[in-house]
Image (cartoon, helix red, strand yellow):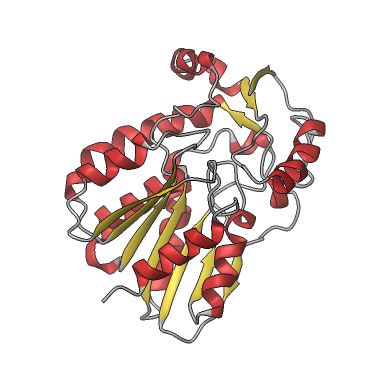
Amino acid sequence: MSLVFSLDLGKSPDVVDSPNDDIVLRGSLGRTLILVHGLTGTPNEMRFLAFYFNRLGYSVICPRLANHGKPLHILKRTTWEELYGSLRTVFIDALETGDQIYVAGLSMSALFVLLLAEEFGDKLAGGICLAPTLFFDGWNVPWYNRLLPLAAYTPLKYCIYFKDSAPYGLKNEKMRGMVDRFYRKARLEDTEGISKYGYAFFPVSLFYQLQRLVRKVIPLLPRISAPMLLIHAQEDDTASIANSQLIHDRISSKVKKLVILTDSYHVITADQEREKVAREIQAFLDRP
């Protein structure tokens, strides 16, 4: 990762790619699985799982979180409450179908799964936290990450960005190469390709929003009793396995399980062991 400083992203349209690239697949089981991409990510991160579970008969929804797909000058001013609110609306709409509703979230969105579990109780049939990120403490996080809280409380938070670098959360070399070709050429003002690859830049202002979200979530963990599955890679380059362990140890769920992957990095929904991730989720959903 490298730091980028910018006062102005330049002129760019307020909407890029399609206005809505949600994945919505209808099933016949009377069960709906909502799959939520990570911060600065895209529903494309969940594509493999979406079609895997739809083939099993699940209705699947992969929503795009608030302001994702829009230029960075819009996304960087988005609060965690707006992000959660966009998912919460999808969840409430899904409840109206009468289906059993399950929600899986990747990275920061795993924390939104925990918020849904605390807020809606047994209306959430089960939650899946995939590489949950409370802290950026993975092996590829640069040393200067520790200094970012200082900038996060100043106007500088809207001017400083991380530019992501290899391995991009992917141990799979073919996928990593595809992302690398896009990210290496990406500029702050670029608006094309976001729906497929996500953002090459991570605003410090969103790091600040994650900090705010973590302060909200951690005290709520003992109040969470919904069945919960956590899956984390031992070699996660963004968030160490301690993130999942903390959640597992503090929630009050009678049904809870932590699965550790040995051949993946952070984006476990698309990496080397995505089929194992799918099978573990399937076993969790099919439990007696």
Query: In the image, what residue occupies the spot 39% across and 37% down?
Result: 241
Residue placed most toward the observer, 19 or 207? 207
Q: Splitting the image into 4 quarters, where does residue 243 fall?
A: top left
Of 280 and 41, the residue lying toward us: 280
Establish if 277 lies above or below 244.
Answer: below
| Residue 263 x %, y % | 53, 46
> Compared with residue 98, is residue 121 higher up or lower down, i.e. above or below?
above
Q: Residue at x 27, y 68 (%)?
A: 123
The reply, left or right, for residue 217 in relation to residue 167 is left
Q: 140 or 104, which lies in front?
A: 140
- Which residue is depicted at the point 28% across and 38% down? 246
Is the C terminus in the top left, top right, bottom left or bottom right quadrant? bottom left
Q: Residue 89: horizontal and vertical position, in percent?
A: 43, 61
Image check: 160 left or right of 280? right
Write the residue at 74% across / 47% down.
174
Total labels drawn: 0
| Residue 63 seen anywhere in this rendered image of the structure | no
Asked whether, in this view, residue 126 is left or right of residue 270, the answer is left
Q: Residue furthest front?
A: 262
Residue 60: give x, y in percent of width and height.
52, 71
Farthest residue toward the bottom?
28
Q: Is residue 181 above or below residue 116?
A: above
Residue 201 seen by the camera: yes
In the picture, the quarter occupied by the N terminus is: top right
Q: Position of residue 116 (x, y in %)?
A: 33, 56
